[in-house]
Image (cartoon, rainbow, N blue to C red):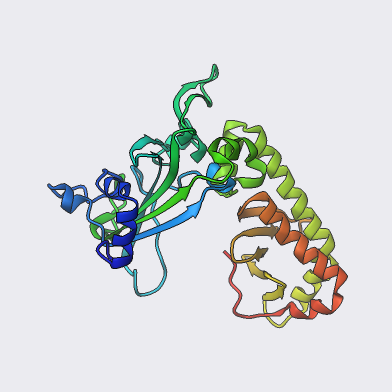
Amino acid sequence: MKATAPKNQKLIKQYPFVTKLLQKWLEPYTRWHNTPEEALRVDDLTIKVERADGKLMFRRADNVGLGENSFIFQSGEKRKGQLMRRGEYAFAIDKQGAIINQLQFPRNREEQRKFDGDTYAFAVLWGSKTLNATGTSHMYSNPLDDVTKYIVWVTVEAWHADTKNDEGLESRFGAVLDRSVHITIYGEPKEGFRKLQETSNVYEHLVLDSHNMIRGAIKKDYDLITMGGMLYELCIAFQDEVYFNGMKEIFNSGEFRGASGQFDSVKVLVAEMCGYERIMIEDSESFISLQLRPDAKNLYVLGQRGTLPQLRNLIKTVIRLWNQKPELRKNFISDQNVTVM
């Protein structure tokens, strides 16, 4: 949607600080242009208004292609020959509509490995921070929750022509073809930002993905390592209650080396890839993938995206329906069109 679209203009009038955010130099921008109007052009603008929740408190930037040669691509003709970079930011806005704080998330994977910086969005509610004695995390002070009215999350995405050049950092990114800005304005919850932060926790509200789990292992983060163990227990429960309890037999006896089935809102996909049996369990908001090595006795977790409660619900739903309603097992059938990432 164009920035000048009536819906956007109405929201900008209601929330004037949006104009200030659009004028900030937020990567990725078109670096080689001489004027801010050219460099910060917005070809597509979306503005949403939501209520702050626990998932926001533990949200962290998913930056791609900033100071490194990573990128996002899409299959299909629309984005053929194009690569995308992404930058994400969090801002605290006071009751007068002024920007009173901005988080400095790590720009790329290398910065994340060296030091996490302001890892989670709740840090925007604190005006000062100092390193702890080991230099691995922050101690926060100067709370801003009493003067913060909104937390604003901004995602900037730029699609570039693919140069096919892998010789240096960001060398694959050619001319910017279009730049989009997605803004979500999170209003203060009924209990206030302070109470929200106090009652939110990493075990319920952090979205677990491969980057978080790797970071947890490298940083020896107790909570993330513990959640990794919890995910493995879910994996073994699915293995014992479902996969080795009939599902693998159906898969092996099928006409194709792929199978799929729907269990309430959860879909299960199984496919063989280079001798490995890969299982994807997903719904509209989360997924967990499991894998079995040739001749191995146990599945292991390959990847996931979702909070621990979401991932737990995926596994528990399939286990419950597989065992309590055996007639639903007929939903799992051989499928030649299954592909599993």
Find the residue positioned furthest to the bottom: 255
In the depicted structure, whether residue 181 falls above or below residue 197: below
Q: Position of residue 207 (x, y in %)?
A: 58, 49
Percent from the top left, x then y, of residue 275? 66, 65
* Front-lying residue, 50 or 108: 50
The residue at 17%/53% (across/down) is: 38
In this view, 281 is above or below 223:
below
Looking at the rendering, which quadrant does residue 100 occupy?
A: top left
What number of labels is visible?
0
* Residue 290 image position (x, y, % from top left): 68, 58
**Rendering coords of residue 225 (x, y %):** 67, 38
Of 234 and 61, which appears nearest the observer? 61
Q: Residue furthest top?
A: 133
- Residue located 44% across and 56% down the image: 49
Say above or below: 133 vs 303: above
Drawn side of residue 341 relative to residue 96, left or right = right
Q: In which quarter of the image is the N terminus?
A: bottom left
Q: Report the side of 177 relative to 62 (left or right).
A: left
Taking depth in this image into account, of 174 and 327 the one nearest to the observer is 327
Q: Which quadrant: the C terminus?
A: bottom right
Left or right relative to 329: residue 267: left
Q: Can residue 1 be seen in this view?
A: no
Judge from the rendering whether residue 127 lies leftward or rightward of residue 339; answer left or right. left
Residue 129 appears in the picture as rendered: yes
Q: Which residue is drawn at 77% across and 78% down?
A: 253
